[in-house]
Image: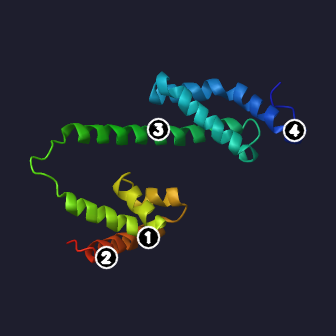
Amino acid sequence: MTLIGRSRAATSPEARFRDLFATNYPDIFGYAARRVGRDDAADVAADVFTIAWRSLHRVPDEPESRPWLFGVARNVVSNHLRSLRRHDRLTARAASAEPSPVQPDLERHDDVTDALRSLGEDDQEILRLAAWEGLEPREIAVVLGCSSNAAAVRLHRARARLADAYESRGGRS
């Protein structure tokens, strides 16, 4: 018996989730399979239902729960595809990079590493998100739980502090 005909108050969260899952999993899996392929569809569907479980109090009652799940699936698929594109770009960049015939300036690298380590954890994290993960301020904002503008300002200030720390160690900008 599905939630149709039963009130939310009369149903335990576990029973409500089981009904939600049993009723909607095939459709959500199919949606994901058509967009990311059958190999990744199970992972996408699992993420959708993980979000549904964590947000069960926000999941609308039937029949509105189905479109809500599709909205979540759309976001999960978008994130999945974005991740695949980022992975493909990094793989292509790594494959096309030729080793430099010139020996790298290891001393300069050590100065930058030391300068980075001298910064606070928050500055180190935002610089790593930008440089190592290739995230833009709007993406960093999501990670840090702040506005895009705040992330851009924090990144700008962290870069300035890194430059100052590097120069104080005798480095050149």
Locate the C terminus by quadrant.
bottom left
In percent of the image, x 29 and y 37: which residue is there? 91
Foreground residue, 131 or 20? Answer: 131
Q: Which mark is residue 80?
A: 3
Q: Mark 2 against mark 3, which lies toward the viewer?
A: 2
> At which x and y percent is residue 26?
63, 23
2 or 1: tag closer to the N-terminus: 1
The residue type indicated by label 1 comes to Arg
- Please report the residue visible at 76 percent of the width from the left and 29 percent of the height from the top: 18
> Where is residue 134 shown, x and y percent of the image?
35, 52
| Marks 2/4: CA–CA distance | 62 Å
**Distance from the alpha carbon under mark 2 to that under mark 3:** 38 Å
SS category of the residue bearing label 3: helix
Q: Which residue is mark 4?
A: 7
- Reading the image, the residue beneath label 2 is 164
In the visual, does 68 lie left or right of 168? Answer: right
- Residue lying farthest left? 101
Amino acid type of the residue tagged 4 in the rendering: Ser
Q: Of callouts 2 and 3, which one flags the residue occurring earlier in the amino acid sequence? A: 3
Residue at the (61%, 26%) spot, across then down: 27
- Alpha-carbon span between mark 2 and mark 1: 15 Å
Secondary element at image label 4: loop
Can you say whether 102 is above or below 150 in the image? above
Given this view, does label 2 or label 1 mark the residue nearer the observer?
Answer: 2
Label 4 Cα neighbours within 10 Å, binned few <14 / some 14-19 / many ≥20: few
Which of the two discs, 2 and 4, labels the residue nearer the N terminus? 4
Mark seen at residue 32: none
